Amino acid sequence: MEQQKSNSSLKAIIVVLSILLVGSLAYMYKMSTDNEATEKQYISEKDGLIADLEAEKARYENVVAENADIKAQIETAKANIDDLIAQLKKSKGDNASLQKYKNDYFRLKREMDNLIAENKRLTEENQSLTMERDSTIVVLDDTRKYNDTLVSQNEKLSKTVEKASKLSIVNLKAEAFKERSSGKLVATDKARRVDKLKITFTIAANEVAQTGNRMFYVQVIDSKNNVLGEKQTETFGDYTLTYSFITNAIYENKSIIVSEILSGDNFEKGLYHVNLFDKDQLVANATFTLK
């Protein structure tokens, strides 16, 4: 009787162990299948991202930049794309690391698209200024041939040259930063954290403009209509300008990027206005908001 009970218990144990073994094998098979599917998806997305990067790089190879700054930035961006491609090819990470590469790709693409748009705008502007200059030269030649209209022609030419020689200011912008103890500037839009404002603008190339030192007055006004910075005043005839600081640039008929830092504390929340003056003439303005 006891022998029968022992046999029954042994059979039960064997059945249980068999069920556990089958379950374990099934679970291992599923895990293997899931891992294989995940690996295939990772490789597919990785190869697709590399193809996108190669396509972007090829698109930028055809960009012709006359502006030295823009050209240097484009070359740097292409080098960054090459570096990202090399990292991707070596990577054997997971989907989280792949997402980081995707984010880097989208950031590089946005930067390059902005550079290409800026390069196109500067090229068109230079072409327009060159056409104005050529038109001025043609008119000058005509005035030499017609002495009877010399006075009126000279007056018209003076106005045309004055217009063509004026500097064009583009891309005026202000960025807010928090300076760390290391000196590194960290971008922020939180008013309580800001202690630096970076004011940047571009003086467009102009072959007929006067070269040399060009001085501009920068005026930063906070949300409570207070002028920040030095709060110095300058009088131009009947006009008095209160400015935040003065910036100087050595202009040589080529496009140049001017960048200055305005330090401060206790910045107010709200909308800020940045105005750029050439003497008493407002040549550019921009806004930004601190939260």
Image (cartoon, rainbow, N blue to C red):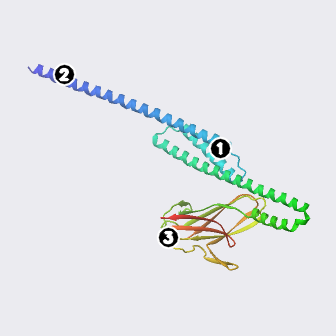
Specify whether residue 122 is in view.
yes
Whichever of labels 1 and 3 marks the residue nearer the N terminus, that label is 1
> In front here: 84 or 273?
273
Identified at 54% across, 46% down, the residue is 106
Identified by mark 3, the residue type is Glu
- Residue 291 place in picture, x, y as percent: 47, 64
- Residue 231 position within the rendered picture, expressed as x and y whole percent measured from the top left: 60, 76
Q: Secondary structure at mark 3?
A: loop
- Of the numbered discs 2 and 3, the one sitting upstream in the chain is 2
Q: Residue at x 10, y 21 (%)?
A: 2
Q: Quadrant of residue 24?
A: top left
The residue depicted at 32 percent of the width and 27 percent of the height is 26
Distance CA(mark 2)–CA(mark 3): 81 Å
| Residue highlighted by disc 3 | 268
- What residue did someone put label 1 on? 60
Q: Residues within 10 Å of mark 3 (few under 14, many from 20)?
A: some
> Which quadrant, please, contains the N terminus?
top left
Residue 210 appears in the rendering? no
Q: Nearer the viewer, residue 30 or 137?
A: 137
Q: Is residue 80 above or below residue 207?
A: above
Can you give x and y, in whole percent of width and height, for residue 199 in the image?
A: 61, 64
CB atoms at circles 1 and 3 under 8 Å apart?
no
* Mark 2: secondary structure: helix
Q: Amino acid at mark 1?
A: Tyr
The amino acid type, in three-letter code, at marker 2 is Lys
- Mark earlier in primary sequence (2, 1): 2
Name the residue carrying label 2.
11
From mark 2 to mark 1, how far is it between C-alphas?
74 Å
Q: Is residue 252 left or right of residue 172?
A: right
